Amino acid sequence: MAIEDNPRSREQYGAELKRRREAAGLTQEQLSQRAVMSRTHIAHIEAGRRRPDPDDASRLDHVLGADGFFVRFLPTLDGKKVAEHFAEAAELERQAIAIKQYAVTLVPGFLQTPEYAREVLGSGHPAKSDEKRDSLLATRLERARVLETFDSPEVTLLLGEAVLRQVIGGAQVMCEQLRHILELGEVRRIRVHVLPFAVGAHALLEGPLKLMRLAELPPVAYVEGLKSGRIWELQSTVRQLEDVYDHALGDALSHRESLALIRSIAEDYDYEAQRDQRS
């Protein structure tokens, strides 16, 4: 039974775990106690939604007397490519109790204002119909609801200076977008750190990164590229990516300095927008 890293293989892996657990006469709760894992994590594995890390798999083998099955047939350890590249990451984002994100040139989706998001969604290739764009916009704005209260998630943003300087939709749109980030930062709903151009080379030059901590499951990382994305669940890899993020964060401006820079750039956009209106 060869297990590949795709939804079907995860279902097979989970079905085998359920079969062996039931054969051993154990409930999910009993297995969770013996394997030192949460019952929820075991339920997600059996449903094909998650995969254990190697330590989890080893404990499952030991408790169930599986002769190394769950380690040998652990799905490929190089991460998961997502067919609809953000679908699973968006679901994890909704479950997250803490998010740390690095953005290179665009404001993260769940922080985008309607006008900024409309410009971003309308800029892709091939061109989208207005109906399709507005449907995507509604979904994106729904994601912003995670910031409506202080309950969760805890959000830390690391923004490349290009995020503030890349003009999307004109000066007025940029002014409103930066003021939205500024407002969330000033009320301490999010923490913002800007990596200024002057820093030069830094640990996250290769691209955007999102780290998510979940309530009852191991943390995950999401790395996005052009029309593609990869979720990393292997805990040794997630820890490495957390270290990279922390290293880059050390080169960034403080929260207070970052808010001051964002405020200054927003004022520049405001001045430019008013000048354009007068001309």
Image (cartoon, rainbow, N blue to C red):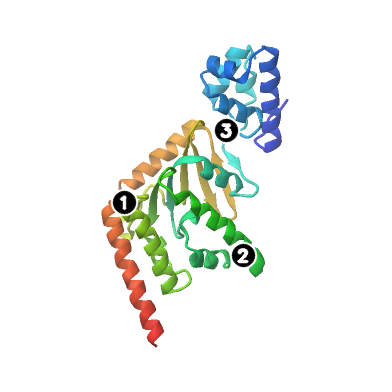
Residue 224: image location, x then y, percent? 53, 50
Residue 86: image location, x then y, percent? 58, 49
State the residue in front, 147 or 250: 147
Task: Check disc 3 and give the amino acid type.
Answer: Leu
Q: Residue reaching furthest right?
A: 1
Question: Is residue 232 shown left or right of residue 256?
Answer: right
Residues at marks 2 and 1, CA–CA distance in whole angstroms: 34 Å
Q: Which mark is residue 77?
A: 3
Q: Which residue is mark 1?
A: 252
Residues at marks 2 and 3, CA–CA distance in whole angstroms: 36 Å
- Count the numbered circles shown: 3
Mark 2 vs mark 3: in front: 2
Circle 3 packing at 10 Å, graded few (<14), some (14-19), many (20+), is: some
Q: Which residue is pictured at 67% across the width and 12% down the height?
A: 25
- Dot 3 falls on a residue whose secondary structure is loop
Q: Which residue is mark 2?
A: 133
Task: Check disc 1 and give the amino acid type.
Answer: Ala
- Dot 1 falls on a residue whose secondary structure is loop
Q: Which residue is pictured at 62% across the width and 45% down the height?
A: 82
Circle 2 packing at 10 Å, graded few (<14), some (14-19), many (20+), is: some
Quadrant location of the C terminus in the rendered image: bottom left
Task: Check disc 2 and give the amino acid type.
Answer: Arg
Picture quadrant where residue 175 is located: bottom left
Circle 1 packing at 10 Å, graded few (<14), some (14-19), many (20+), is: many
Question: Is residue 196 shown left or right of residue 31?
Answer: left
Determine whether 10 is above or below 207 in the image: above
- Chain-order first, disc 2 or disc 1: 2
Mark 2 vs mark 1: in front: 2
Determine whether 253 is above or below 279 in the image: above
Residue 185: image location, x then y, percent? 34, 54
Mark 1 vs mark 3: in front: 1
Quadrant location of the N terminus in the rendered image: top right
